[in-house]
Image (cartoon, grey):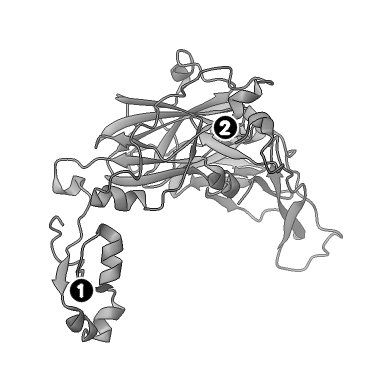
Amino acid sequence: MLDSLFFSVANHTVTVVGTDGSYLKPFERSFIFITTGQTVDVLLEANQSPNHYYMGASVYSTAGIGAYNNSTTTAIVEYNGNCTPSLPPVLPDLPSHSDTGAGLNFTASLRSLADKEHPIDVPMEINTHLFYTLSMNAPCKNRSCPDGKIRTLATVNNISFINPSIDILQAYYCCIHGVYGTNFPDVPEFVFDFTADYYPMDWEIPQLGTKVKMLDYNSTVELVFQGTTLLKGSDHPMHLHGFQFYVVGLGMWNFDKDKDPLMYNLVDPPLQNTIHIPKDGWVAIRFTAKNPGVWYMHCHFDRHMVWGMDMVFIVKDGESPEAKIKKVKLQYISNDSARKASFKKRKKGLMKKASELTTLCGIDAGAIVYSPYDSQPEI
């Protein structure tokens, strides 16, 4: 998964009705813009002359580094009935590969139903403001690594994420110290013209780290993503696990904290879990942190994620039982008893080897039985 796409069916329009599992106010377009990891629901009416029509998708790319596939992938929409198809079938008319305006205008057209049957709950009073820059980076000074190879990193707020040897969820759940830091910055350490054409090369070198942002349960969060042109830049489809968020604003160039919020859509913003951030632009999202646990956020371009454009939110437990991470019931039984456990129980996944538990929380046991139907006391 490396690119966002334009999609169209020749000589047809589509009616867009949903995205990322949420309904939208229907609207018609001759094409759709969809980014990696995102879903868009459309209706196609076969109201043209019986014929064969190409549907096609082409890459949207403004990346300054690396090549992209400049071809158009196609398939044929064929009408039933007697017809003499044109040869070749009619081709769709798609925007150019770098038409940022086309993609931005499509995204800005998404509106939630926001009616009595489909209410929305946009946070209005924000108590946690975050501003995250998204950048391409170089790991070595002057882009020259000792082995002579060209290498690339990617960052959120100039921090390239290092995957720990122990899962962050496991470390948080089992109170294992030294796995991650809790000091992920709310804003970039260094503020500059994020969409400038030229920078000092030293600015391309990021920090490396495994850092998380802690959120109180039920806190209301506004997060502004800012695309940058470091290392010539790129667009980024950002995906947040564990939540859907309202996309309340988007625009080009540097985010203006005084002027741009005045243009937010707080009436019927779309509810999504993946959003495209243009290279020279910004997107503002809002959500309520009411899902306790450890939640990964990352760019959905595989290579950007591998290069370090990811981070983690930890939402703390709330007061009520429903607002806490569900604990697993662990019960000790001997290894001999475990060997005698029925195949039926093992097939249901109720048996865990002692080694599996040891790697989970460092507990020494012969075997563990977990019943999801029992109450869940603390470990």
Question: Residue, x 85% and y 59% (percent of image)?
Answer: 86
1 and 2 marks in contact (CB < 8 Å): no
- The residue that mark 1 highlights is 366
Name the kind of residue labelled 1 in the image: Gly
Q: Nearer the viewer, mark 1 or mark 2?
A: 1
Question: Residue, x 73% and y 39% (percent of image)?
Answer: 97
Question: Residue, x 60% and y 28% (percent of image)?
Answer: 204
Mark 1 secondary-structure assignment: loop
Q: Is residue 109 visible?
A: no
Question: Residue, x 58% and y 26% (percent of image)?
Answer: 281
Q: Is residue 321 visible?
A: yes
N-term mark: 1 or 2: 2
Q: Is residue 86 above or below residue 192?
A: below
Q: Is residue 109 above or below residue 171?
A: above
Q: Nearer the viewer, residue 344 or 4?
A: 344
Tag shown at residue 107: none
Tell which residue pokes out farthest to the front in this image.
Answer: 146
Residue 116 in the image, given as x and y percentages of width and height: 32, 39
Residue 133 in the image, given as x and y percentages of width and height: 51, 28
Residue 206 in the image, given as x and y percentages of width and height: 54, 31
Residue 212 in the image, given as x and y percentages of width and height: 37, 38
Q: Nearer the viewer, residue 82 or 307?
A: 307
- The residue that mark 2 highlights is 135
Q: Is residue 124 left or right of residue 62?
A: left
Tell which residue pokes out farthest to the right in this image.
Answer: 87
